[in-house]
Amino acid sequence: MYKNYLWATQRAHYNKKAQPYEGCLLCGVAQNAKGVIKKIVYQDKKVMVILNVFPYNTGHVQVVPIRHVENLEDLSDEERNYLFTMVNKTIMLLKKTFNPAGINMGMNIGGDVSGASIAHIHVQIVPRYKRDIGFMEALADTRVMSKSLDDILKQLKKNVDVLKK
C-alpha cells in the first residue's frame, strides 16, 4: 500500500453524500445496488467483468461469478468452467484493447480475509506494461494512473464483443 496521498479536497462534498454499503460489495454491483460504484464492462446471468475501482494498473479488471460464492470448490463444474472461459476471453479483451506486455492474474478465495474484505470469489486480472513504473511509484511511493476509470471503461466496451463470442 502506498504511504503517500495526492489530496483532492474538492471531493469532500461528494464524500459527505456517500452512504456506506452494507452487505457483499460484489453482490451489490451485480444487483445494481444504490451507493455502490459500478464500472461494469460486461454482465450476463453467470458472471460479470468489472473494473477494479482501486486498480493496480490501467485496465485492472475482475471476473466475478454473479452467484455469491466464497470458495472455488463451491462453484459447480459448469460455473467454474464458465468462469475460466470468461477469464480467458477477458485476457483477450485486454490484449486487444491495451496491448499489454504481460498479464498478472490471481484469485481472491476464502472469504473476507482473501482480499479487500470482500467475501465473494473473484479473479483479478492486471495488465502489465513496459516502463509502467515512474518517478512517483519508485521514489514517492504513490501510484499514478495514466487514464481515468471512465476512459478505460469506454475503451473496453468498444471491444466487448470479444466476451460475447
Image (spheres, rainbow, N blue to C red):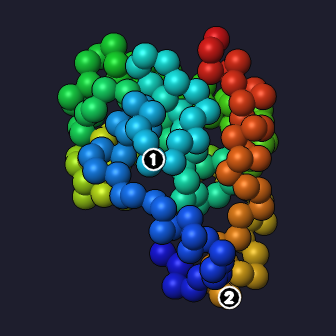
The answer to whether any part of residue 124 appears in the image is no
Q: Report x, y in % for residue 46.
A: 41, 19
Give the quadrant of the C terminus. Answer: top right
Q: Amino acid at mark 2?
A: Leu
Tell me whether the residue at label 1 lies in contact with that at label 2, contact meaning CB atoms closer than 8 angstroms: no
Q: Nearer the viewer, residue 111 or 10?
A: 10
User: Percent position (x, y) of residue 114?
Assistant: 29, 54
Residue under pointer 2: 139
Residue that numbered label 1 is attached to:
36
Q: Amino acid at mark 1?
A: Val
Residue depicted at x 35% and y 23%: 80
Q: Is residue 128 above or below residue 123?
A: below
Is residue 70 in view? yes
| Closer to us: 36 or 156 | 36
Q: Nearer the viewer, mark 1 or mark 2?
A: 1
Pinpoint residue 74: horizontal percent, then vertical percent.
Answer: 21, 28
